[in-house]
Image: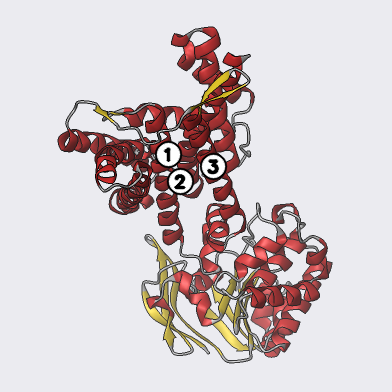
Amino acid sequence: MSLLIQSVVNGLNQGAIYALIALGYTMVYGIIRMINFAHGDFIMVGSYTLFYTIPLMIHAGMPPWLSLFVAISVCVFVGVAVEMIAYKPVRKAGSMSALITALAMSLFLQNLAMVLFGANPKSIPAIFTLPVLEFFGVKIQSKYLLTMSIGIVIMLALSIFVKSTRIGKAMRAVPQDKQASTLVGISVNRIITTTFALGSGLAAVAALMYCSTYPRATIDMGSMMGLKAFVAAVLGGIGSIPGAMIGGILVGIIEIFVKVYIAPGWYEAITYGILIIVLLVKPTGIMGKNIGVKV
Amino acid sequence: MLTIKDLSVSYGAIHAIHNVSMEVKDGEIVSLIGANGAGKTTILHTITGLKKANSGSILYDGTDLQKMDPSKIIQLKMAHVPEGRHIFPDMTVVENLEMGAFIIKNKDEIKQKEKEIFERFPRLKERRKQLAGTLSGGEQQMLAVGRALMSSPKMLLMDEPSMGLSPLLVKDIFNIIKEVHKQGITVLLVEQNANMALAISDRAYVLETGNITITGNARELLNDERVKKAYLGQ
């Protein structure tokens, strides 16, 4: 019983991280039909920002989690810069060029990080120092509860933002009809930039959540996590915001449950296996809608 | 109000529009008629900047539209109801109208406009919470017009509003255009349904493979032998 509850909490925590990353993939895909393969690397950027700024915060006598805001700023800057410098010029050149550019950006960011920060993993100082809670004999790390709640609150806030604000509605309108969006006065380019900024900001929050669970930053951390979050986005239905949240949480829970109850070494095989089965049964993913691709 | 001079537009090597000049005066309904592929839609697209011209000028109230970002043109109070309606299918009727008022930031003003549109189109009010993609063709066309009116335009460009509608709905749509015009909105109407278009217009231009071949008073064109033969099926 105790193990089950702990696994649920861990699974939700892990799932919330994947969900936040998957949101970045899905929002960008929704708006420009491109898989931003460099998105995972934004988490690496966020994690290294945390590594370098947490000691500064502590030194200045401030709580370490304030570094999150530095990480968000850095990630938003990098995300928007990548979009403007690398993606925008090839936007009209077709999806293959965009895809290759995204892969190249991912490699570029990783290698740039290697030059700047070195190849050795960095150990990230504790972000939250919170006690272990005990409910009826079940021990739960309260930092897991905290990061999980941060993830859920951010997802709720994003849902409300996209559902009811003017900019959020424009973000939904642009992928539905770019021409009509332009005619009603929406600057499509500005909405695309906003989407990248939001996605990168979410990646920074995911970095904070990840680093408080696994306090280590490596150059390639983003590509592996990004891949799993990408799986989550596809599982939930790429382009669908609720789909990314559901897909992310599912992948997190499956991962932890397989690790705990089946065989630790098998979790990736089972996650990808489930993806294959879902795609066979419902190619558009759980929440995805069947939209005909126009030739 | 709108003056087009020597406009030429091409798609790659294909010339779609050759040296077209036309004018729409304040308060008029002007229609642009012609067969499929004559370039009518291209002209409208070039006016609102969705397509770039090769040469020529488009002046609207003294502003050179070609120098403007397409998303800024609606701020000059010119709204474009595109061919094929282009509503936002996964948004509700109300949300579509709200998008039409994207440039308006005052929420009360948007609510007021919404009320006016719903008075004009009671059918849309009934379906306000429905996803626009699930509306019938006629309702979608009304929504497209309603969305354009949300920005309080002075000039409305309408591209084939009767396309794909039943004769009864076509009549409705033309009545709506007349009403909109009565409220002081200048209309540039692109139509294949020449009969109906000429019946409500002040003046008309006939476009044939990218050239304006006939122009004049709409009533006169209705009786013009060439127009009758080519576009009125007589």
Question: Would you say A94 lies left or right of B40 here?
Answer: left
Residue at the spot of label 2:
A28
Residue A279, horizontal then vertical, whole percent: 58, 25
What is the three-letter code of the residue carrying label 2? Val
**What's the distance in space between the residues labelled 2 and 3, CA to CA?**
8 Å
The image shows a total of numbered marks equal to 3
Quick one: label 3 or label 1, which is nearer the N terminus?
Answer: 1
Residue A276 visible here: no
Q: Residue at x 45, y 70 (%)?
A: B70
Q: Which numbered tag is attached to residue A239? A: 3
Label 2–label 1 contact, CB within 8 A: yes
Q: Residue at x 67, y 89 (%)?
A: B184
Above or below, comparing residue A210 to residue A293 in the picture: above
Above or below, comparing residue B106 to residue A108 in the picture: below
Above or below, comparing residue B193 to residue A240 in the picture: below
Q: Quadrant of residue A105?
A: top left
Q: Secondary structure at mark 1?
A: loop
Q: Secondary structure at mark 2?
A: helix
Observer-nearest of A258 and A37: A258
Looking at the rendered structure, whether the residues under marks 3 and 1 are on a common chain is answered as: yes
Residue B115, horizontal then vertical, whole percent: 75, 74
Residue B149, horizontal then vertical, whole percent: 66, 76
Q: Which numbered tag is attached to residue A259? A: none
What is the three-letter code of the residue carrying label 3? Gly
Question: Would you say A201 lies left or right of B39 here?
Answer: left
Residue at the spot of label 1:
A35
**What's the distance in space between the residues labelled 2 and 1, CA to CA?**
7 Å
Quadrant including the C terminus of chain B: bottom right
